[in-house]
Amino acid sequence: MTDIRLPIGTWAEAFVQFITDVFQPVFNVISMVFGGFYEGVDLLLQAPPFWILILLIAALGVWARGWFFGAGTAVGLLLIAGVNQWANAMDTLALVLVAAIIAIIISVPLGILAARSQTASKILKPVLDFMQTMPAFVYLIPALILFRVGVVPGIVATIIFSLAPGVRMTELGIRGVDKEVVEAGHAFGASPRRILRQIQLPLAAPTIMAGVNQVIMLSLSMVVIAGMVGAGGLGGQIVQALSRIDVGLGFEAGLSVVILAILLDRLTASLGAPSPKRIFARSAAKAAVAGAPANRVRKGLIATGVVVVVAALAITGVVTSNSGPASAGPDNGDKKDLSIAVFNGWPEGEAASYLWKGILEDKGYNVTLEYADAGTAYVGLSTGDYDVVLDSWLPTTHKAYMEQYGDKLVDLGSWNEDAANFIAVNADAPIDSLEELAANADLFDNRIVGIEPGAGLTDATEQNAIPQYGLGGMNFVTSSTPAMLSELKAAMASGENIAVTLWAPHWAYDEFDLKNLADPKGALGTTESIHSIGSLSFTEDFPTLSTWIKNFTLDSDRLYELENVMFNGDAAGAGDYAPIVEDWIAKNQDYVDSLTK
């Protein structure tokens, strides 16, 4: 390979930084508009009792496709409610509707432009090719920087990802209209705008609706990815299930996504399906420019207006009915609402976060746990979208994040001093040190199973342990923490030797019979501390809680005990840790009481 490298990545980073510095006020406005649109739709979906919404959607299904589909719609939505995913499903549906509506508003005019201008078509085609082939995850990086964490970057990434089929199908539909019909319109003296409105769009409607269907389906396919940047909903549930290897939660959330997908697909497909009315409209359009198509367009506009007015009134009514005085918060000078960022796949942080959630909600706080990857969590803390994270490993593992965002964060001190990174093997493996691993690589299938590529432990393994101990001949497999734990579980069950990157404290040490390989060269770093890191305004917003967290300590024995009941206990498979932690708090009441004195 040549040493010459094109600095394309550097140029892209510089460009994103430039538009962030120059146009941040514009992006703030867009974020406010998109966020407000989402909150309005979500409020409209969440406010009514679930059974009322099920009846309304089922009635829509009966009107669109008949009684059989209406009954299936009711059963599917009742199943979502039955597995306690209704609120998450409505969050996801709101995100899909908002992203799809905006994508359609953008894509249909672009498709019309491309159909009427060969130049525009030639310009748009490579852009659309780029948008369709670029991995969807890539869109999240600039979206996260420009629009901060939460639902808005998920909406933006979804819009970009789903835009292309709307443009392509609109162009295809208009270009596919019979030229003789268009020429007839010209012969009767119709203007190009009238021909578009009364001939081309009505006749191209089935193809355009097929594009709308694809836009909605692609939007729904993005919900899991959106969950990685704090969008919540069913995507957030699936990300949590993946981080915990929770098959039950993953299946329930995944099944809910499937039900929504079938429902949206069938409803939108029915709007574009041929019918006697549409066939008659085609014949009428060939006979005359004016007439039935124009009437149908006018009726459609009237119906759309009615829907918008009803929706606006419904939102106004919901807001009015919920505009009473807020319930009292903690009487100690702190704000009531607290957002705790929780790293996906980090059990010690999840345990500490649930512990504090249980403690604080008893004192009147409204605590929300926001699951995110480490990078996303630090971005959210730096912008104030999250209030605190309880799982920052210092001075090594999360050093890069603190160097990048440290001037916008507050270190609230450490609560555990025993954190450390290791390469662990099964306890009966014939080696005890990293110095012996290279010579016995074949016993471990010549591989080390790692976690996420961007993790600090992964970096320490690649940059330090592998070169220092001559492990370059081994295959270092990076994937995710859940994948590593799954591989570890399979190897232990079959009695195979396995080497994995792992850290303490972690419940895997109690679940499996493992030992850490000695690291005489200190390649993986020394023992670290687990710190609580707050946003820049945290001590101002939560003066009392800041004092509690600064004094917070949780030794490894007590942490292992809490992790065991959460992740390995009899009730762990349910996926709801709140009652498990509540029971643990009751058994350790003296210790818990000491945390808030």
Image (spheres, grey):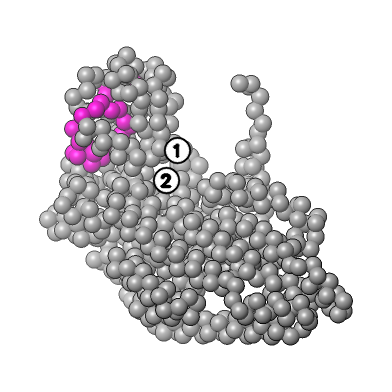
Left or right, residue 370 beside residue 352: right
What amino acid is labelled 2 in the image?
A: Ala
Left or right, residue 63 beside residue 544: right
Quick one: 248 or 357, which is closer to the camera?
Answer: 248
| Residue under pointer 1 | 454
Left or right, residue 335 beside residue 586: right
* Above or below, 592 relative to 90: above
Residue 333 in sight from this viewpoint: no
What amino acid is labelled 1 in the image?
A: Gly
Quick one: 428 or 175, which is closer to the camera?
Answer: 175
Question: Range of the magenta residues?
Answer: 495-521
Residue 260, by quadrant, is: bottom left
Residue 291, by quadrant, is: bottom right
| Residue under pointer 2 | 374
| For the residues bearing labels 1 and 2, Cβ distance under 8 angstroms | yes
Marks 1 and 2 sit apart, C-alpha to C-alpha, by 9 Å
Residue 292, by quadrant, is: bottom right
Label 1 secondary element = loop
Left or right, residue 410 beside residue 35: left
Quick one: 175 or 366, which is closer to the camera?
Answer: 175
* Above or below, 128 relative to 519: below
Q: Is 561 within the magenta?
A: no
Residue at position x 53%, y 85% in the image: 310
Dot 1: within a 10 Å radius of its alpha carbon, few (fewer than 14), some, or many (20 or more) residues? Answer: some
Quarter of the N terminus within the rendering: top right
Label 2 secondary element = helix
Residue 527 in sight from this viewpoint: yes
Disc on the earlier residue, 1 or 2: 2
